[in-house]
Amino acid sequence: MVEHQTLNLGVEGSIPSRLTIFMKDYELIEHTADIGVRVSGSDLKQIFVKAALAMFDIIAEPCKSCDSIKLNKFDIKIEGQDREELLVNWLNELLSLFDAKEVLFKEFKIDTLSETGLVAIIFGCPRENCKIKAEIKAATYHELKIEKIDNGFVAQVIFDV
């Protein structure tokens, strides 16, 4: 799993500044016809956010103008029978909004998360500003896992492409 690094940079004659470099926070899983990801986090909120970020990283490359424009905001509420179904429903709802509203989502704030429900605010930029890399049709139940580990959780999800 790749994480982020903080570098201390100094320029002669100036006060040293800190630059944080964010790297991919997921692992791609080899799969015959589909694309899979594995994410880990200290809690389930991190798992859901990292899975969404990984999915949209696979789908598109946001253009630089996404950082300078006001992001579109959406409130969503998702339900499921258990946390695995909830994860699939979350990701598929995001895909549906991506297509219907033509927005590439890049920020996710999960307000509440239980074993069967999720309330979140999501933010994104117009899809027209982004370079599409791959089409994901849906998150699937195939090889789906959310497991408790010593220092948090790990999840695996396969996307139908």
Image (cartoon, helix red, strand yellow):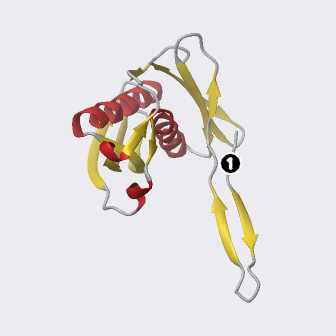
Tell me the residue that label 1 is attached to.
3
**Of the pair 41 and 114, the residue shown nearer to us:** 41
Residue 42 percent coordinates (x, y): 62, 46
Residue 146 in sight here: no
The quarter of the picture where residue 150 lies is top right
Does residue 50 appear to the left or right of 100 in the view shown? Answer: right
Name above or below for residue 26 compared with residue 5: above
The quarter of the picture where residue 155 lies is top right
Residue 105 percent coordinates (x, y): 38, 45
Residue 72 percent coordinates (x, y): 28, 53
Q: Which residue lies furthest to the bottom in this view?
A: 13
Specify the quadrant that holds the C terminus: top left
Residue at position x 22%, y 34% in the image:
100
Label 1 CA crowd tier, 10 Å (few <14, some 14–19, many 20+): few
**Of the pair 121 and 81, the residue shown nearer to us:** 121
Mark 1: which amino acid?
Glu
Does residue 20 appear to the left or right of 138 in the view shown? Answer: right
Residue at position x 53%, y 11% in the image:
33
Specify the quadrant that holds the N terminus: top right
Residue 61 percent coordinates (x, y): 47, 42
